[in-house]
Image: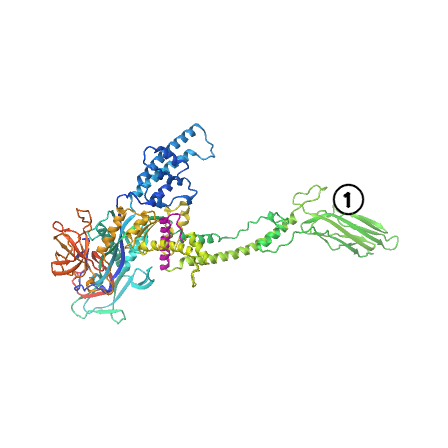
Amino acid sequence: MTELDGSGTEHIAPTHVSPAPQPLTGSAREIPKATLVQLRLPVPPTGQALVKSAYARQLGLRPQETDAVRDRLRHTGEVPDALLDLLAAYERPDQPSLLPPPSTFAEVPVAALKAFGDALVEVRRQRAAGLAADRAGARAEAASPDPAGTAQQDVRSALVAVRALVANTRATPLGMLNLERLEMVPAGLERGELIATIPLAPLEETAVSHKEWSVRSKEFTSIVTDSLETVSETGVTDNTELSQSTTSQAQHSNQFNVTATVTGGIPVINGSAQSGFTSQDSRSQSATDSTKHATQLTRKASSRAKQEHKTTITTTTVTGSEETSTRVLKNPSQVAAMRVDYFSLMRRWRVRLYRHGLRLTYDLVIPEPGAGLRRMHKELSELKGQLGPFQFGLPHSEITDAVLPGETQPHFRVLAERYGAVVPDPPLPPSAPQFSVGAPSQDEGWHIFTPDPLEIPEGYRVKTLNLWFATTSKTGDENKFSFKVLGTPLYIKEQDQGEYGPMELTSGAYGAFMLHATGKVFISFEMINNRNTTIRVASEIEPIPTQPDPDPTEPAHSDRVRDKWRSDVWNLLRDAAQSQYYERQQDIATKAAALEEQIEQVDTLTLRREESEEIMKGVLRFLLGPDFAFMPPEVVDAFAKARVDLEHGIGFDENGLGLDATAWAAVREHEDLVRFVNQAIEWENVVTFLYSYFWDVPQSWNFVRRLRHPDAARQAFLRSGSARVVLTVRKGWEEDWVRFAEGGFTSRPTPPDSPYLTVAREIAAYDDRNYPGIPPANPGRSAVRLEEAVYATSRDVLGKSAGPVTIRVDSSKDFLVGAQVVIDSADRTDPADGRVVQESQIITAVPDPTRVTVARLDRAHDGSVTPFAVLQPGTKGALIAEWNEYTPSSGTDIEIGSDLGSGA
C-alpha cells in the first residue's frame, strides 16, 4: 500500500490491521521552523550609508590624493566638490574622531562614489608607473622599503574597493523570513514488519524470550528544552519520539554543515532562492523549498529512530521437564502443526507544515562573534601555559656581595629577600693555624712525639711553617740532648740547652717540608735526653689557586672558597625559589581548575543567552559605527556624579537617583536609542550563520581552532571567524527600521518612494492580511475564528464597492460570519495604478453553500480567466503541506497462522 505526501512523493505504508483512529490533536508536538528568502530589488539611488562609508575607509586615501582626483575630474562634473571635501577627511585615518559619521553618505549617489574610485585607480596607476621607471634607472638600497611596490598595492586596494562597492550596492540587505511550524500528531498504530515466526509441531512446547533494545545505552533519553523567554524544562521522552528525533536530526545535520552553523531562537532554518517580493502562499517557491526541506528532515529522523530501535524473538525448545521462562507456547493439537507470527507495531504520525507569519529581515556580517566569550579561554590558556617544570635561571655570577646601582645592600641579600631564603655571609680570610706544646722528657733512648695536627681550612694550603723550640738536657756531660723533625734534614745533635728558631721548615733548606699541604698537617719530633722542652709551630696559609701554581714571588690567587660560598648560596636560593614556584603552581592549577569549571559547568539556557547577547552586542557595534558607545561618556559622567559604583554596577538602588536635569536628559537620550534597537528587532527570532575560524585574522587561527567546549553549539560559536546575522524586524516596525538603517543608522528622512521602504510596507501588509494572529482570550461574537484555514475560489468579476458585496465561491462551507477573509493574490496588480489587488475584508453573511458576503471591496477582482482565492485564515496559519511518518513503538502484535503473503 502506498501514500502520497504533499509534494507527490510515494511512500510505502505498513499493512493496516484496523481502521486508523482519529489523530490525537491534544497530543500534538510542535517545532518552530522558518524559511529565509533573500530579496532581489533594484539599487536605490540613496541610502546604504554604511556600505558607502566602509568603501571610503577601504580606499585608504593618502595625503593630496583627493586633490589629484579633483584635478582629473574638474571638467567632467561626475563628482561634486562637496563629496570631494567629504572624502578628503579620510586622508587622515590616524584621527578617527575627525571622520564623518556614516549617515553623511546616505544621500551620496553610488555613481559619484564609483567615478571617484575609478579616477583614483588611474591616479595611482600613473604614480606606480613613474616610481617603477625611477626604480629601473636607479638602484635602490636593499634595506629601504620599495615605494613602487607600495604604489602597486595601493592600486590593487582601490580596485578591490570599487568592485566591492558595486557588488554590495547591488545586493540588498533586505529579505523575508517566513515563520513556520511543524506539527506532529499521533495518528494511531499500524502493523509493521514481521519480527519472528515460530512453527510448532503437534504437542510441541517452546519457551519464548522477547527482547527489545535500543542502540543507545538508555531506553529513555533525557531531553532538555531551552526557552530564552521562559525557563529550562527537563523532561523524559521515549527515543522513538518523532518530534525529538527531528530536532536531533536537525542538530546532527547542522554539526556536519561545513559551510556554516545555524543558531538562533528558531531550531530549524532553511533558505530559499533569491527573488523579488511575491506571494508566500503554498504555491510559492519558498513554500516548495520549505516542504522539501521539512519532509527530508522528518524522513531522516524517522529512519534514525527505526535504526536505533530493535526487537528480537528467540525460542528455546523444552522437552521432558518444566522450565521457567518468560512465555511458554504449546501446540495443543495432536495432529496439526501451527505457526505463531510476531509483528512490530509502528506509530503513525500526521505531520503538517504551517506558515503563520512573514517578517522583514536585515542582513549583515560581523567578525569574531565569540570574541567576548573567548576571553575566559584566553585566560585559561595563559594559566595553563604557566604550568610546567621548575627552572632556575639565576647564574652563579650574579651572586655577589657588591652593592649594585639602585640597591642599598649587598646584592646577595637582595636575592635572598626576593626568594625568601636565609643565606650565609661571604667567607672572611681564616686565621693561620698554629700550636705551642710541651714535649715529655725522655731519658732512656730516642722517642717520637707527635702533637695534635694543624687544621688547614678548606680551600687553603700551607704557604710556610716556622718552628721554635727550647729545651735543656739531662744533667751530666755525657747526657746532652738531640732533636729531630721527622721528614726533614733538621737535626740538632748533643747540645746542653738552648732556644732555637724560627726555622722555616717549608724552605728549600729543609726539603720544602709540608709545603702546600692541606687538611690535617701532622708534624712528628724525635728527641733524646731532653728536659723542659717547649715546641711552637706557626703556619702561614694561602688559598689553593684554581690555575697552575703561580710565580712563587707572587701571591696565589684562588676563587675556590668564594665559588663554594656562591654555590652554597645558589643552592639555598634555588631551594627557596623552588618552594615558591610549587606554591605558585598549586595556586595557578587551582585557578585554572576553577576557571575551567566556570567555563564548562554552565546550564544550556545560560549558554544560549550569553551567545544571543554577544550577537546583539556585535550587531550594535557594526550597525551604529565606530563612534557608538554602549554607554556614552556623558552618561558615564552622569552616573559618576550620582555616585554609582561603576565597577560593580550598583547605584540606582536607593530612594533618589541623584541626577540633575542635564544628566537626566543625557541618560534619557541614550535610553531612547537602546529602546528603539531592542523593540524594532525580534531578537528572539534572529538567525545567525556561523562561519569557520579561517574567516578571522590568520594570527588567531592556531588558538581558535584548538578551542574546545563540551557543548557543541558553544564550541561552534567560539570557533567562528565571522557570522552572518539575519535580523528579524518586529511586526509594525518595518518602516521605522528601514528609515533608520538606510539613513546611516540615524533618524534621517527616507524618500517615500524608496524601493526598500516600499517592500517593507508590502511585507507588513501581507502579514496583516494573511496571518491576522491568534484571537483574544474572550473574543466577541463577530471575532469567532477557526483553528484551520478555509480556502475557496471564485470566478466572479467584481468592481470596487463601498457597500456589501456577495461573492460566488466553489464552497462556502466553514466560512464564519464576522471572520476576516483575504481576497485575491499578492502577485496580482491593478493595471490602472500598479497596486496589489489583494485585500482583507470582514464576512457579513453566508447566504448559501456557494456564496459569501463581505462588507466592502476596495479593489477590483477578475476571476474570469484565473479564479481568485478567498481565504479565511486560521489561528494555526496557512497549511503548506501534510504527510505521514512512522516510528517504531514498544508494542508487538501476535497472530496465529497469519497470511504472510499480504503482510510486511
Q: Is residue 690 left or right of residue 569?
A: left
Question: Which residue shows up at 30% across the image and 49% down it?
Answer: 738
Q: Residue 900 is drawn in which quadrant?
A: bottom left
Question: Dividing the image into 4 quarters, which one contains the C terminus?
Answer: bottom left
Could you tell me residue 786's position as x and y percent? 20, 62
Front-lying residue, 632 or 575: 632
Magenta segment's dominant SS is helix
Could you tell me residue 536's position as x and y percent? 78, 52
Figure check: 108 above or below 280? above
Figure check: 310 above or below 322? above
Density class for disc 1 (Cα within 10 Å; few <14, some 14-19, many ≥20) is few
Question: Which residue shows up at 31% across the image and 64% down it?
Answer: 236
Q: Is residue 447 left or right of residue 904?
A: right
Q: Is residue 664 visible to us here?
A: yes
Is residue 625 inside the magenta stretch?
yes
Question: Dividing the image into 4 quarters, which one contains the N terminus?
Answer: bottom left
Q: Residue 635 is drawn in which quadrant?
A: bottom left
Q: Is residue 132 left or right of residue 582?
A: left
Residue most extreme to the front: 661
Could you tell me residue 184's position as x and y percent? 24, 60
The residue that label 1 is drawn on is 509
Residue most extreme to the bottom: 322
Please name the amino acid that badge 1 sits on.
Ala
Q: Helix, strand, or loop for circle 1?
A: helix
User: Which segment did they paint magenta?
Assistant: 605-630
Is residue 90 inside the magenta stretch?
no
